[in-house]
Amino acid sequence: MAENNRAAGRAGAAADAGDVPAKTARAPLTWRDLYRALAAWAPDLTPDGWWGIADPYERAWGTVLVQNTAWTNAKRALEGLRARGLTAPDALEVADRAAVEKAIRPAGYYRQKAATLRRLAAFLRRTPLEQPCDAASVEALRRALLAIKGVGEETADTLLLYVFRLPAFIGDAYTRRLAERLWGRPFAYGEVRRAVLAEGFAVDELALFHALIVEFGKDVCRKNAPRCAGCPLAAACQLAGRVGARR
């Protein structure tokens, strides 16, 4: 999200990997191990600082606006909504469609996203942000979010975690790429989500974990030319130095 937070972990990128079990260790690497290593890599990163947005409804709109674009573009679109007084659910739901489209044009796909925003605004207007946190209730809310046209798994789980502050996890491309390199096999979205939730992380930990993975994926474990040299996870990584790593 907030680009300036990426620098939070650079100073610790060469952190000691001793806290992470090596590939030959008896105990396999766990998601908890990964969380601890990344938290040591970027000790100053916080979920709120990463977002750069405190208002839960603005986070909700940002979650839609960032679909298929960079956060910088989504942020400009969100600023357009702010400038027109369209960040409250009741205002956004009844806003003129053309006005919403004009406000969010920098995010691209503005017609589809405007329609999704209005549908999500209607949902959030009638849905309290404070919801039961038991597994059945969270899953029911997730299904309700997924029923909104334009809301997929990644968007729904982001809303659950960062807007409703419920136990959820986002198995996005950054997470799946990191998992594949660490464990040496492909991971599906749902597999990542279930595996992380099964380890019993607190909501605040889940929120930080996702932020850490995204920033680590941008700075170190990049899609192309990952920076394997000095990576705090290199000792546990199945593909360290074998995926076009840059030194």
Image: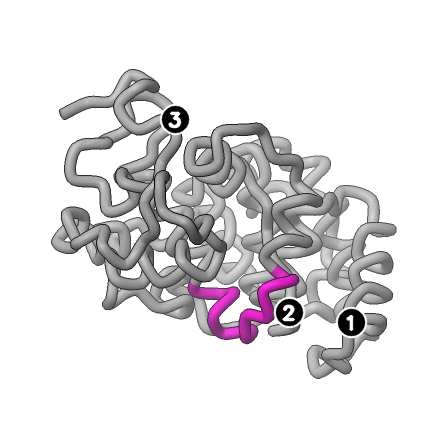
The residue sitting at 76% across, 42% down in the picture is 150
Q: In this orientation, which residue lies closer to the viewer: 239 or 107?
A: 239
Scheme of image coloration: one colour
- Magenta-drawn stretch, dominant element (helix, strand or loop): helix
Query: Which dot marks residue 167?
Result: 2
Whether the residues at callouts 1 and 2 have beta carbons within 8 Å, the answer is yes
Query: Which dot marks residue 135?
Result: 1
Under circle 2, the secondary element is loop
Under circle 1, the secondary element is helix
Apparent side of residue 20 relative to residue 120 in the rendered image (left or right): left
Apparent side of residue 223 relative to residue 160 in the rendered image (left or right): left
CA gap between label 1 and label 2 equals: 8 Å
Earlier in the chain: of badge 1 and badge 3, it is 1
Q: Is residue 194 positioned above or below 160 on the image?
A: above
Q: What is the magenta range?
A: 197-208
Task: Provide the residue designation for mark 3.
Answer: 223
Q: What kind of residue is marked 2? A: Pro
